[in-house]
Amino acid sequence: MRIGVFCSGGDAPGMNACVRSVVRTALSAEQEVVGIRRGYQGLLDEDFHRPTGGGILMTARCVSNIVQRGGTILGSSRSPEFRTGAGQQKAAAILKKHGIDALVPIGGDGTFAGAIALRRFWAGRVIGCPGTIDNDLCGTDYTIGFSTAVATAVDAVDKLRDTAASHDMMFLVEVMGRHNGSIAIYTALAAGAECACVPETPTDIPSLIERLQELKLRGKRSIVMIVAEGDEMGGAAVLNEKLRTAGCPFETRTVTLGHVQRGGSPTPADRILATRLGEFAVMSLLAGKTGGMAGDVAGKLEITPFEATIGTHHHPPEDLMRLVDVMSI
Ligand code: F6P
């Protein structure tokens, strides 16, 4: 079997470990692997990873010394051309031309929506791996990159807390997670933030003001509020403006962590998850499976149909949301 592997959408720490796992698992099983560069756009451009010496087949050495590296050696992109039916048909023809029988796309919701679309025109097998910092996919407890993104955010919040405490100040820290509050909730809990504003629960200015006044009365001198970029109220800057207008009892500053959360060396948890899922994806393809994502659910590796991974909202655990409040009294 000739397996194509690629990364698509926003990069996530651990994607390299996953590519490495796919390549080495396939080679160990005496299969061929083609590395497709820059996601679906690279496929349309026939942009393949070419090991020195020519050809498009990857070797075990192509993935040497990458398990610890952030980003992706294959590159990534979001491709407007692939979103069209014509683009998807062209991609199918290119896969046929290069004798690719199966694909392992590594990415998030857009990547899997792309896989569903491609399968309308192409009969090859597809098993994806969840590579996104957002942890917003159903069918896996954690996505590859989430652990590292949270660790990066927690490290930043720890530093901001020093300044907040020194100056009796409140920081509103905006974290990523397009439509999902997972990064915000995990960061808030691990960094001891007083509040987390996330899209899964209503953000209400009068209640927040009341809570901040109560915390001030209890003797809190510094506050950290984590704001998910996808909060229905808006990001940290918008929320800050609304809180100030409503009489926020603390002097405030806003910080947007942004893409810094997408980079850096993956945590051991992300490397191990990526390695396990990469192997499982290849072994599932060889066992005849197709049309789904490899995930880890309560320690058990499972394949979930692509439609189900993106069909419903993946909620951060409610007990963690509750704990943020309990821990901040
Ligand atoms: O999906 C991953 C993610 O990092 C989101 O958290 C964020 O909203 C988005 O990508 C940012 O995308 P871009 O890099 O295209 O601005």
Image: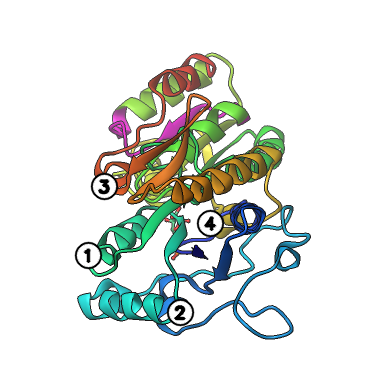
Q: Which residue is mark 3?
A: 307
Magenta includes 94? no
Q: Nearer the viewer, mark 1 or mark 4?
A: 1
Residue under the point 59% across and 41% down? 276
How dense is the environment of label 3, judged by Cα within 10 Å: few (below 14), some, or many (20 and up)?
some
Say if disc 1 is inside 8 Å of ligand 1.
no
Task: Reply above or below: 270 against 27.
Answer: above
Q: Secondary structure at mark 3?
A: helix
Task: Reply above or below: 259 against 243.
Answer: below
Q: Which residue is mark 4?
A: 258
| Mark 1 and mark 2: Cα distance apart in space | 19 Å
| Mark 4 and mark 3: Cα distance apart in space | 29 Å
Query: In this view of the protein, can residue 173 be seen by the observer?
Result: yes
Q: Are marks 2 and 4 in contact (CB under 8 Å)?
A: no
Residue under the point 61% across and 74% down? 57
What's the residue type where badge 2 is placed? His
Which numbered dot is residue 90? none
How dense is the environment of label 2, judged by Cα within 10 Å: few (below 14), some, or many (20 and up)?
few
Horizontal side of residue 67 vs 2, given as left or right = right
Magenta includes 199? yes
Residue sitting nearer the eye, 255 or 281: 281
Which numbered dot is residue 98? 2
Residue 260 position by quadrant: bottom right
Residue sitting nearer the eye, 201 or 292: 292
Q: Which residue is mark 1?
A: 120
Q: Are marks 1 and 3 in contact (CB under 8 Å)?
A: no
How dense is the environment of label 1, judged by Cα within 10 Å: few (below 14), some, or many (20 and up)?
few
Say if disc 2 is inside 8 Å of ligand 1.
no
Residue sitting nearer the eye, 326 or 122: 122
What's the residue type where badge 3 is placed? Glu
What's the residue type where badge 1 is placed? Arg
Magenta range is: 191-206
